[in-house]
Image: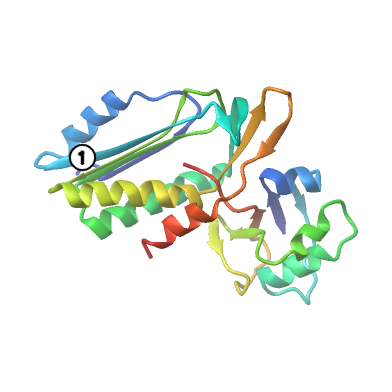
């Protein structure tokens, strides 16, 4: 049986088109696929960013992300889901995360996509550090808005 | 017991991990945080600031009431900021 949930944590870039085609192939009969690609922004709070470093907890990360994807699969009866999250050093404009959810209809596909990115932000062991043009760096503070977005799926 | 630290907690403590002998008075994650918060080490007081530091035991997110066992891998870290 083909895997419903595909999760990868990696430092290299990903190809959303290739991931989309792979998800299509393993979810024949899906009526729609929702997707989200996160991209590193070039500024934070009005300050130019030169790079972002994503730290993670290697022994825990894949398991935690897989649990989130399997939760989405159960809640919305997804035919398949793909989550790719990058770690390490990234520069503005680079892709950082991909989530895709395949379902019979658009509503579960779109809802599951929102759920996946909301929970990835607050429940998977990743921490972002921003490096600024003046040579300083700062850890990204957890946002109350992100906690609230994750909480609406309880 | 093996302790792991991540992100700014790792930087403030000046170490990514350490081995500790668990005092017999410490039975839960919350009690371990209280005990760690009393140590005279750089950044130690961060453990006393309730509600900030999150914990995982054997790679699972847990609350302060979670019981500890010898041999557990316990990780402490700030709120997560992925995605």
Q: Residue furthest bottom?
A: B25
Colour option used: rainbow
Could you say which quadrant of the image residue B21 lies in?
bottom right
Which of A88 and B81 lies nearest the eye of the viewer?
A: B81
Q: Chain of mark 1?
A: A
The residue lying toward the viewer, choosing from B83 and B31, is B83
Picture quarter with the N terminus of chain A: top left
Residue drawn at x 50%, y 29% as measured from the top left: A40
- Residue located 19% across and 51% down the image: A107
Residue A31 on image: x %, y %: 11, 43
Q: Nearer the viewer, residue A37 or A17?
A: A37
Q: Estimate the x, y position of residue B70 in percent, counting from the top left.
A: 68, 65
Is A70 left or right of A85, judged from the image as shown? left
Q: Furthest-right residue in view?
A: B40
* Quadrant of the rendering where the C terminus of chain A is positioned: bottom left
Q: Position of residue A14 (x, y in %)?
A: 39, 25
Kindly tell me whether residue B16 is visible in this rendering: no
Q: Residue at x 23, y 35 (%)?
A: A23
Q: Position of residue A7 (x, y in %)?
A: 37, 40
Residue bearing mark 1: A33
Residue A154 sits above or below residue B78 on the image: below
Secondary structure found at label 1: strand
- Would residue A44 be seen by someone viewing this image from the given angle? yes
Q: How many marks?
A: 1
């Amino acid at each position: 049986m083909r895997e419903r949930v595909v999760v990868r944590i990696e430092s290299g870039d990903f190809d959303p088109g290739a991931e989309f085609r792979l998800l299509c192939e393993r979810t024949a009969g899906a009526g729609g696929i929702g997707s989200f690609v996160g991209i590193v922004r070039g500024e934070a709070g009005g300050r130019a960013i030169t790079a972002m470093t994503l730290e993670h907890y290697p022994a825990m990360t894949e398991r935690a992300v897989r649990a989130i994807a399997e939760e989405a699969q159960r809640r919305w009866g997804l035919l398949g889901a793909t989550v790719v999250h990058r770690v390490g050093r990234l520069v503005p404009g680079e892709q950082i995360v991909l989530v895709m959810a395949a379902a019979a209809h658009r509503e579960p596909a779109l809802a599951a996509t929102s759920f996946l990115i909301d929970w990835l932000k607050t429940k998977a062991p990743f921490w972002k550090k921003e490096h600024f043009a003046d040579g300083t760096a700062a850890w990204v503070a957890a946002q109350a808005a992100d906690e609230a977005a994750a909480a609406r799926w309880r | 017991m093996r302790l792991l630290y991540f992100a700014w907690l790792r930087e403030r403590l000046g170490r990514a991990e350490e081995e500790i002998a668990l005092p017999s008075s410490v039975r839960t994650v919350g009690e371990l945080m209280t005990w760690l918060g009393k140590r005279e080490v750089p950044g130690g007081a961060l453990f006393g600031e309730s509600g900030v530091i999150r914990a995982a035991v054997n790679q699972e997110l847990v609350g302060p009431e979670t019981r500890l066992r010898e041999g557990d891998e316990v990780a402490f870290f700030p709120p997560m900021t992925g995605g």
